[in-house]
Amino acid sequence: MSDVYAPPQGDIPILHADHEILAVEKPAGLLSVPGKGPDLADCLIARLAEAFPQVLLVHRLDRDTSGVMIFALTPHAQRHLGLQFEKRQAKKTYLARVAGRLEPKTGQVDLPLAVDWPNRPLQKVDRAEGRPALTDWRVLRAAEDESRVRLMPRTGRSHQLRVHMLALGHPILGDPLYAPETATAFPRMMLHAEELRLRHPDGGAGVRFRAPPPF
């Protein structure tokens, strides 16, 4: 992670807004919530609160990840959506560019994760103490130097996709924490939350929000 936090400027794309929920496209490089200290105060939820003062957090994306995020606009919606994430009912799809040729075309990573305490905020595979973490993958395009993959996390552990891809030997390109040797060759981390499917808190109808990857 860079020593200097310089979040991108400009408007936040609104994908959907109604009386209960707000779906937006988070840019890479912007914190989801404030960090510690005044220099880390600028974040997605603070910017959204200017137009939606009632906005409430439901889930997070890493600072260097872009893509679809959903927020609640009422306490009821926050509870309803939070429960869907907790019970793994929310379906998340990510697009990533990873190092090397990932084979086979589809697969699953089932490796428990835990905080790497001496190197926080890094996470690590920990078969003894880690919490269960499951990721499905599908290769969309592959060459010798990199692969374009769709990632479907079944759990929502911190840095899950980043650590799971690293564990496979195919780290996400441009990742400043887990593939720092590639960070200078790419303008950002090549991980994007492409689609989120869940049930609307008012009535339970299925809804889908999508933001095409910018890379």
Image (tube, rainbow, N blue to C red):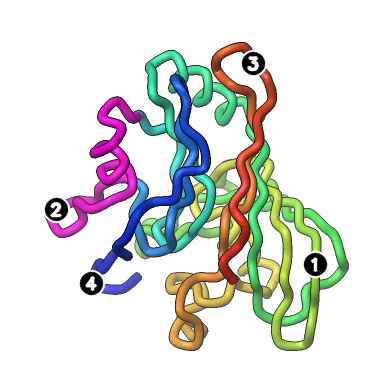
Measured as percent of width and height from the top left, residue 105 is found at: 87, 66
Instruction: State left or right for residue 178 relative to residue 165.
Output: left
Task: Find out whether the residues at labels 3 and 4 contact each other: C-beta distance under 8 Å.
Answer: no
Q: Secondary structure at mark 3?
A: loop
Three-letter amino acid code of the residue under disc 3? Gly
Which residue has dot 4 on it?
Answer: 4
Magenta region includes residue 50:
yes
For the residues marked 3 and 4, what is the alpha-carbon distance in whole angstroms? 42 Å
Task: Find out whether the residues at labels 4 and 2 contact each other: C-beta distance under 8 Å.
Answer: no
Q: Which residues are magenta?
A: 33-55
Measured as percent of width and height from the top left, residue 211 is found at: 59, 52
For the residues marked 1 and 3, what is the alpha-carbon distance in whole angstroms? 32 Å
- Residue for point 66% across, 79% down: 99
Which label was assigned to residue 140?
A: 1
- Residue for point 59% across, 25% down: 84
For the residues marked 4 and 2, what is the alpha-carbon distance in whole angstroms? 13 Å
Three-letter amino acid code of the residue under disc 2? Gly
Is residue 132 visible to us here? no
Mark 4 / mark 2, whichever is N-terminal: 4
Which residue has dot 3 on it?
Answer: 204
- Residue for point 69% across, 47% down: 134
Mark 1 / mark 3, whichever is N-terminal: 1
Instruction: State left or right for residue 174 relative to residue 46.
Output: right
Count neighbours of disc 1 (C-alpha within 10 A) and say few if under 14, some if 14 to 19, many if 20 or more: some
Count neighbours of disc 4 (C-alpha within 10 A) and say few if under 14, some if 14 to 19, many if 20 or more: few
Q: Secondary structure at mark 1?
A: strand
